[in-house]
Image (tube, grey):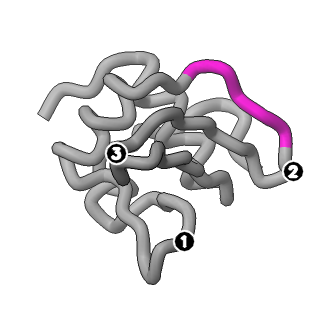
Amino acid sequence: MDISRTEQRILHLLAQGGRIEIEKNEKKRIASVKCLTRDGWHYPGVDLDLFRKLKRKRAVSSAGGGPYRITRRGLELVRAELDNR
């Protein structure tokens, strides 16, 4: 399965310990999405469409109403980058 460059960046951030937090509106629909790195910094590269793509590919999931984190499937999709620690 082919993954775009922006999807790769987000999956890489999530693999290093980041998370995606969502906010819902009064109709219980997703209103906004934000990606936080493991250090707590906001990463501006995530929008609702990208989040839905990652969710459709089963690369991210939420457990118990918590933030979205990378799944085993997401770890299989992510490619290695030079700045791994």
What is the three-letter code of the residue carrying label 2?
A: Asp
Residue 8 lies left or right of residue 37; in this view the side is left
User: Which mark is nearer the camera, 1 or 2?
Assistant: 1
Earlier in the chain: of badge 3 and badge 2, it is: 3
Q: Position of residue 58 (x, y in %)?
A: 22, 54
* Residue 44 located within the stretch drawn in magenta: yes
Q: Earlier in the sequence, mark 3 or mark 1?
A: 3
Q: Choose between 15 and 60: the one closer to the eye.
A: 60
Q: Residue at horizontal 66%, vertical 31%?
A: 82
**What number is the disc on residue 39?**
2
Image disc number at residue 29 = 3
- Other residues around mark 3 within 10 Å, as few (<14) / some (14–19) / many (≥20): few
Instruction: Identify the residue position indicated by label 1 in the image.
Output: 66
* Residue drawn at 46 percent across, 43 percent down: 25
Mark 1 residue type: Gly
26 in magenta: no
Label 3 vs label 1, nearer the camera: 3
Position above or below: 38 against 32: below
- Magenta residues span 41-45
- In this picture, is 70 found above or below 4? below
Disc 3 marks which amino acid?
Arg
Q: Secondary structure at mark 1?
A: loop
Task: Please tell me which residue lies in front, 78 or 80.
Answer: 78
Q: Residue furthest bottom?
A: 64
